[in-house]
Image (cartoon, rainbow, N blue to C red):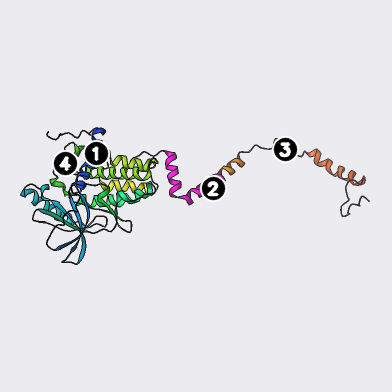
Amino acid sequence: MAPRDDNTPLPESLRALAAELDDLGDALVQSASSAAPKAPAIDGFTVVEPLGRGGMGSVWRARQESLGRDVALKTISETLGQNPDGIARFLTESRTVARLSHPNIVTVHEAGRDGGLCWFAMELIDGRDAGHVSFPGPRALATFAAPLCDAIDFAHRHGILHRDIKPSNILVAADGMPKLGDFGLACLASAAPGDGAGTRRFMAPEILSGASPSEAGDIYSLGATLQHLAANNLGKASPDADFAAILAKAAAKDPLDRYLSAADFAADIRRYLAHRPVAARPASVPHRTVLFIRRNPPAAIGIAVALVLLACVAALALRPHDPRPEPAPETPAREEARPRIRRRLMRQGRMPRPGRMPRAPY
């Protein structure tokens, strides 16, 4: 059946089936032979031990004799390129990927073809893949994800699509730095084939429907990968609303609903980490207030104290006046009578005379 031309998303039931087929394919590859895979013989490399095996080929620890360094040597079967043009394109594009230099991308040192094998010599990472790393909370996962977005944006700006972003292709070095690896399916964006290659569980709906790979497809794959890691690490305690909205936007079924670029994806994650409103979710006034308090605790405390003082001043200014009447003003008659009253009180002894101390009552 010819691939569909539209970008209609596949039903969830078909996506679940695609995930099961991925698992089945990996299981068949692993169980195809109980014996260890045969080490390849490639000029200039001494294979030490196998590191992993998948549907696309095998990865080996090897020694690159010319430079005296250990590398990860990935061998890919020639069946991925059934014609000379396909092999030529593989070699051209793999050498383009080898020119990518980014701290969060596994460096491809060299690529070539030896007999019936195409191979990559890559930076050897002593660590684990993201699927075997624990993340204690959404902020830890967001901190892990931001540099991966930077790496994807770097590749896109150099015209390279990854096409197979998934947990097992994200390596974590001993210092915790994530590195995007396995560019074995990478291609030039200007000549992206619609061959359906990749891991179906993490592929964008439009690519599953037959569309050509795109930057939007890589963004979807990373969003789906992060959702998978969040579900595995946080269980039923889903990420907070802002981070969940970021992942949902990245993994939206419609490409037009996703981030326009991996750089926009990274920027929204960093807004989340900085306790700022994110583009993926409208922020209400109460939510903006909470974010401001988290972002500026000292300033928030100062504003709260100022508001309390202002409320106290307002309360004093608005308190009711004394209801007692003020004394009546002095009249001329009262002023004239005051000396006579004073003299009478002094004669009666009820008021001391000027210059004389009053007597004690005993």
- Crowding at dot 3, Cα within 10 Å, few <14 / some 14-19 / many 20+, comes out as few
On the image, numbered disc 3 is attached to which residue?
A: 326
Answer whether residue 33 is visible to the viewer in this image. yes
Three-letter amino acid code at the position of disc 3: Glu
Three-letter amino acid code at the position of disc 1: Glu
Residue 242 position (above or below residue 102): above
On the image, numbered disc 2 is attached to which residue?
A: 305
357 or 186: nearer the viewer: 186
Tell me the mark number nearer the camera, choosing from 3 and 2. 2
SS of the residue under disc 1: helix
Three-letter amino acid code at the position of disc 4: Gly
- Crowding at dot 1, Cα within 10 Å, few <14 / some 14-19 / many 20+, comes out as some
Tell me the mark number nearer the camera, choosing from 3 and 4. 4
Quarter of the figure with residue 330: top right
Tell me the mark number nearer the camera, choosing from 3 and 1. 1
On the image, numbered disc 1 is attached to which residue?
A: 20
Q: Main secondary structure of the magenta part?
A: helix
Q: Position of residue 16 (x, y in %)?
A: 26, 36
Q: Position of residue 198 (x, y in %)?
A: 19, 44
Answer whether residue 163 is visible to the viewer in this image. no
SS of the residue under disc 3: loop
Q: Are marks 4 and 2 in contact (CB under 8 Å)?
A: no
Q: Are marks 1 and 2 in contact (CB under 8 Å)?
A: no
Mark 3 or mark 4: name the one nearer the start of the chain.
4
Q: Position of residue 33 (x, y in %)?
A: 18, 49
97 or 260: nearer the viewer: 97
Three-letter amino acid code at the position of disc 2: Val
Q: Quadrant of the N terminus?
A: top left
Q: Position of residue 3 (x, y in %)?
A: 14, 35
- Crowding at dot 4, Cα within 10 Å, few <14 / some 14-19 / many 20+, comes out as some
